Amino acid sequence: MSKKLTSRAEDYSKWYNELVVEANLAENSAVRGCMVIKPYGYAIWEKMQAELDRMFKETGHENAYFPIFVPKKLFEAEEKNAEGFAKECAVVTHYRLQNDPDNPGKLRVDPEAKLEEELVVRPTSEAIIWNTYKGWIQSYRDLPLLVNQWANVVRWEMRTRLFLRTAEFLWQEGHTAHATKKEAVAEAEQMNNVYADFAENFMAIPVVQGLKTESERFAGAVETYCIEALMQDGKALQAGTSHFLGQNFAKAFDVKFTSKEGKQDYVWATSWGVSTRLMGALIMTHSDDKGLVLPPNLAPNQVVIVPIYKNEEQQEAITKVVNGIMKDLRSKNITVKFDNRDTLRPGAKFAQHELQGVPLRIAIGARDLENRTVELARRDTLTKEIVNLNGLTEKVEGLMTEIQESLFNKALDYRNNHITKVDTFEEFKTILKEKGGFISAHWDGTPETEEKIKELTKATIRCIPLDGKEEEGKCVLTGKPSNRRVLFAKAY
Amino acid sequence: MSKKLTSRAEDYSKWYNELVVEANLAENSAVRGCMVIKPYGYAIWEKMQAELDRMFKETGHENAYFPIFVPKKLFEAEEKNAEGFAKECAVVTHYRLQNDPDNPGKLRVDPEAKLEEELVVRPTSEAIIWNTYKGWIQSYRDLPLLVNQWANVVRWEMRTRLFLRTAEFLWQEGHTAHATKKEAVAEAEQMNNVYADFAENFMAIPVVQGLKTESERFAGAVETYCIEALMQDGKALQAGTSHFLGQNFAKAFDVKFTSKEGKQDYVWATSWGVSTRLMGALIMTHSDDKGLVLPPNLAPNQVVIVPIYKNEEQQEAITKVVNGIMKDLRSKNITVKFDNRDTLRPGAKFAQHELQGVPLRIAIGARDLENRTVELARRDTLTKEIVNLNGLTEKVEGLMTEIQESLFNKALDYRNNHITKVDTFEEFKTILKEKGGFISAHWDGTPETEEKIKELTKATIRCIPLDGKEEEGKCVLTGKPSNRRVLFAKAY
């Protein structure tokens, strides 16, 4: 806990890795590319889950659970989806181990327990779910089908980083079926809006809503909506995606329905997901060189109280006051922890809570008792003030809102200051190198140009913003005509 | 929805299978032995999860998440555990598929993407978790470590049944580490108590708490505590287990701590889990020939309201009254659904809600409007009564408690009537055949006798009851001396 973090200016990437481990959020495991999410990190993820789950249910979705395995034959059925994920999937080939005759005490795969058909560990569940939907959908009465799943998925990534890119990650995946194209598109848009709302109003992370270009689209999608956030190092991070899948999966799995008019047609589909990657976005949006900074909505403990005493008598008197404070705060649904450990000095406690991003610290000592005051320390601004016990609850309540808003506004200012309009490729390269952030530029609409720009600069098209305006211009690389700007950035 | 279920008397097993599918709880998937948990079934599971999670947190536990894969070398480390699970584990051997040159459009495992070390899909997580704990535990200050995980696990069972025994299932697994044996034993006992409390007071399922015999113990445990329930067909069902693991895993993974006195010692461990198997216990404890019967605590909808009207005018008037009823019920935290679908007749709705076990149905028609009454129908007793709108909320609130208690008492009566003391093996066989249930008998304490009785009768020792009294007697099979009775039964 006491190790000083590398500063962001010195090495942003190192700072991130150290912070995740030192703040007890997650760590690498014995399994290549897979992480252990530690209790403190998981408690933050649980808060995200609870709020998202509430939002999904409010928009009419129900949860269900589908198998972790996808038989190879089903995996193959939607060609583009299969092609997109084949290169990175874990495959179960056997269902038994046996004693290894050559190595006493060791086990080996039992050659006689080979599966007839290999099972893919789900990298995403469209295949197994649409194969199931075939049995659930016969008529327009069965539609819309609005289902979400909380699950683990596996993608065998070669270069992994805690939360940002891991071989196994946790996520939710919504899979919906509709009678019309219009309804399915509206659902995909609605869920992208839900994600944007969640990111901005719950996580305090400003996002740009947009469409992916063809080459960045989800494998098997007709259109991919996304929310894109900007990290403090000027790199973008895709924080959530929502796909309009057309009838691709319905055709691959032969899912038809009879309309009110008695006509048979394939069903229209969407899928949408966010993952533990959001933890990475959270960390990199708000934190500083002293450690994690958490918006109150996501903090497992919104307030921590540290007592400062020299003897038992003082300790008892402080504890009595603290119990009153806690009762009052809890009555306002503020989560508060009394850090009365006797194994650590106050200074060490301060450092730990700073590192772990507790939004507000209350310190209370003998002199405070006399004066009927406490010391408040805000994690986000690192400012302190002495306040009276009278009115403390209202003060803290107000600060929770203020900190939440202030973090969003700070991130929004940074993001808005890092969207740069450029009209020449020289400028494009200069801005990318010297300032980073999103570059708003014209593009001729071809995958070739997109690929060329990526090759030359490592920047990709993050999205075609939904709120972008029509504007005549020339492609920043080829000079060919374009009628709207897109957002480029280097990305996680 | 309209198919009539096979009756329990006719074929209990068939009744169960039909009920699970017809009530929309779960179904078999395209993956051998794996199930799809459908939204209605999952909503019940979510209620179990929420309550258990609350109970775990109240007893000081935190959630975390560990990888789904266990490298073979770690899997092997605790010998008995490895031996116990080796025969039924799914093994990942490759991390990529490629186009199959012999079958255009098909994929095959890429022979060049073979893992150096195979990965076992977790059948339980002691190995991966204790390998992680090695890094988390150095001193007594790090203890106790009280962690729980909600996860999916895979056991390659050859004979599977929805919820009761599936290749993949959902569960929670608690894994705790302690400084002393006494503390670890107390934790294992505490968590078994939590399970018993949950089963009885939340699920309305009476259970016997006991210890497993050596041959029924968890692989790698020193002692296994369990809760055993009795199904309506006289077969027992193990509903939860809590293991005292001694220092077995600490030794296998070299997890030591320094005590307050500066001494090094291995850590003491427990693990404990319940799974989606509880869904099977729930179904088989309370349901009847008409379908599912749900205790109010677990019902996704505690009350359903069905309107009965002949014209739009009546429909509008009814809707107005129903909106008032719903508002009042919701203010008392009663979940209520207004089934105003115009695609189904009231009779069909009644049948569906009966099949799906909604505890209380309110029907309201034109005459009820005039009389300011509604019709209440209890699912558990299949009784109906006409009640006045005045006081309806209080009436319903009272019924929720009454139904919950009544289901428990009914199950308790059945269970108590099906614990039979026997002192001869002839009697043992007769009771088992003619009455079923638990048989309380003396046993000489040897695995050989236990095995022999199983061979002869298919009955196993479900547990050595914790509240059993010392009593001199003779083993029901061998006549050898015994000092307490144990519970035998055929089991799921």
Image (cartoon, coloured by chain):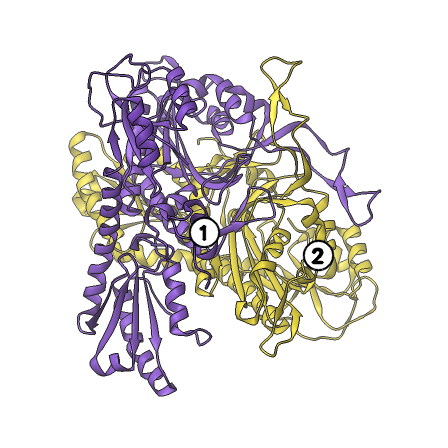
Chain colours: A yellow, B purple
Instruction: Provide the secondary structure element on which disc 2 rests.
Output: helix
Q: Can residue B448 be seen at all in this image of the molecule?
A: yes
For label 1, count other residues whose C-alpha is less than 10 Å away and answer few (under 14), some (14-19) or many (20+). many
Type of residue at label 1?
A: Val
> Which quarter shows the N terminus of chain A?
top left
In the picture, measured across the screen, residue A130 lies left or right of residue A150, that is right
Q: Which residue is mark 2?
A: A216
- Between B107 and B292, the residue placed more toward the observer is B292
Q: Which mark is drawn over residue B361? A: none
Q: Chain of mark 1?
A: B
Q: Which residue is mark 1?
A: B20
Residue for point 30% across, 55% down: B296
Query: In the picture shown, does residue B158 fall above or below A128?
Result: above
- Occupied quadrant, residue A254: bottom right
Alpha carbon separation for disc pair 1 and 2? 42 Å
Q: Position of residue B308 (x, y in %)?
A: 34, 77
Q: Residue at x 50, y 24 (%)?
A: B84
Residue B158 x, y percent position in the rendering:
55, 35
Q: Quadrant of residue A18?
A: top right
Question: Is residue B187 in sight in this rendering?
Answer: no
> Residue B143 is drawn in which quadrant?
top left
Query: Left or right of A64: which side holds A350?
Result: left
Front in this rendered view, residue A460 or B103:
B103
**Amino acid residing under circle 2:** Glu
Q: Nearer the viewer, mark 1 or mark 2?
A: 1
